[in-house]
Structures are given as structure tokens and as C-alpha cells.
Amino acid sequence: MPGLSKQQLDALSAYYRLLDSHPGLFSGRERRPIIRDPAILELFAKEHQVVLGVVASNKYLWLINDLVQSRDAAGDTLLHPYLRIIAPPQTDLSLPPSAGSVVLATIPLPSAEENEMIVLVEQERHSTGSLELELPRGFAEPGTSAADQALAELRQETGYLGEEPRLLGSTISDSGTSDKSASFFHVPVTGQEAEKHEPSEAITRTVLLTRADLWKKIESGAVRDAFTVQALGLYERRLAQG
């Protein structure tokens, strides 16, 4: 790959390995197919001074910059990069793809008007640079079911214990940028112990809110996490169904 920087070379090398090991990640997309020919990829990267391939990766997310083929209004072919975020590919292909688990945990109240509290965490998010109030959530570990991961996230982030997680639904929160799915669970709280935050987390406190108060914070913009809004909507739909 003459004329390419080390960054470009490393990104494309990782991309080729991904093409070989997980071809399904590049299938479909009939209206905007992904270019897989190394000669075309390398020429485009060189001429346009762009990094194609696996741009960055960690244990939670991979940032991929594909080269795709589109057509303009006149029907002429266009090649251009297209970024996407994927779940880290499993080394063991027999395991299911990793997914996030979002936990809507409830604590019963004796009041007839407000019969339960919802468990939330306040933490500083790197992406926003500010404190965000949201439901506990996390990425599933390889080989761990989403339901078990939901109970683990609740325990680690808040210290609350639960059992019998009930699936509320699963979504892709932003199909324009990522294929990562999230599964939403309702978990009744059954006990409490000391929370055990991961060192990389910046959780400041646990917050308990009624459903009515949580909706008010969503409406005011005090809660703006999309996963929390989705989970609450799915939970209220389940309650309405009985």
C-alpha cells in the first residue's frame, strides 16, 4: 500500500481482517453498497487523504469508515466515505452479538397515588461533559445474557438487587450511525447492598423518582437520555396492557 500513512495502513489492515472474519457486516446495502476491493480502497485513501477502515476501537465500540458507492441525480456513480459504529465483533462466532442492557428498576411504595419509585443514576458523561440523570445500563459481556447483564448493571451502579427481569423490548437507538441494539428490562427491586462502580465510571449518586416526576424531568429537559425515555415509554405501554 504505497503512499499511505501508518494510520491509514493500520486502519485498512484491521478492516481486511474484519472483512474475512465477519463478511455479514458488509452484506446487504443494495442501494449504497460497500466497496471491498483493496485496490480501490487504497487508491481512494491515498488520493483523498482519508482514513478508511477500522478508525478506532475499544471493548465497547468500533468506529468504521467504509467507502460506499452512491449515484447522483444524473445517475453517475459516486464513491464517498460513510462512518458507522458497530458492536465489537465476537471472536467466538457461536456467541450472540453483544447488546446493551437498560434497566428500569422499581421499588414499591405504600401510597395509592404513587405506587412505586424508579431507580436512576446521576453520572458525568464524557460525550456531553456534564452530569446526566439516566437509568442504569451497560454493555453485555461475551457469553452473558442481556437479562443477566441487566441485573449486574443494577447491582454494580446502584447497589440495588433484583430478580426476574422482564423484557420490555429492544431497539436500535440511532440506525443512522450504529447497529448496536439495546434491550430494555423491568426489574422489581428485592434488596440492596453497597454499589461497586467500575473505576472508569463517574457516577455521583443514585436518585429515586416516581414515574410522574421522571416525566416532568424529561419534559423540562433535565433528563435527556434517549434510552431512559425509550424505557419509560415501553414500561408504560406494558402497564397499560396489564
Image: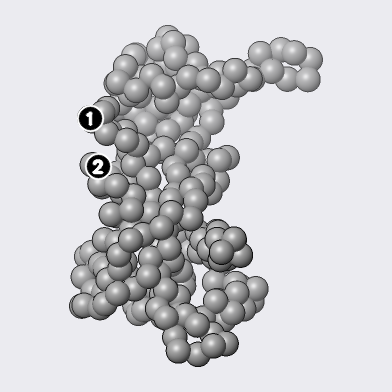
Name the spot of residue 220 as percent of width and height, x first: 64, 76
Name the spot of residue 168 as percent of width and height, x first: 48, 55
Pick the residue in front: 49 or 154. 154
Name the spot of residue 217 as percent of width and height, x first: 58, 77
Q: Is residue 46 above or below residue 109?
A: above
Q: Quadrant of the N terminus?
A: top left
Q: Which mark is residue 92?
A: 1
Cβ–Cβ under 8 Å for marks 2 and 1: yes
- Label 2 vs label 1: CA separation? 9 Å
Left or right, 112 with reference to 162: right
Q: Is residue 196 above or below residue 138?
A: below
Q: Which mark is residue 142?
A: 2
Name the residue type under label 2.
Pro
The colour scheme used here is one colour
Pick the residue in front: 59 or 39. 59
Q: Quadrant of the C terminus?
A: bottom right
Q: Quadrant of residue 42?
A: top left
Q: Few, some or many C-alpha atoms within 10 Å of disc 2 (few <14, some 14-19, many ≥20)?
A: some
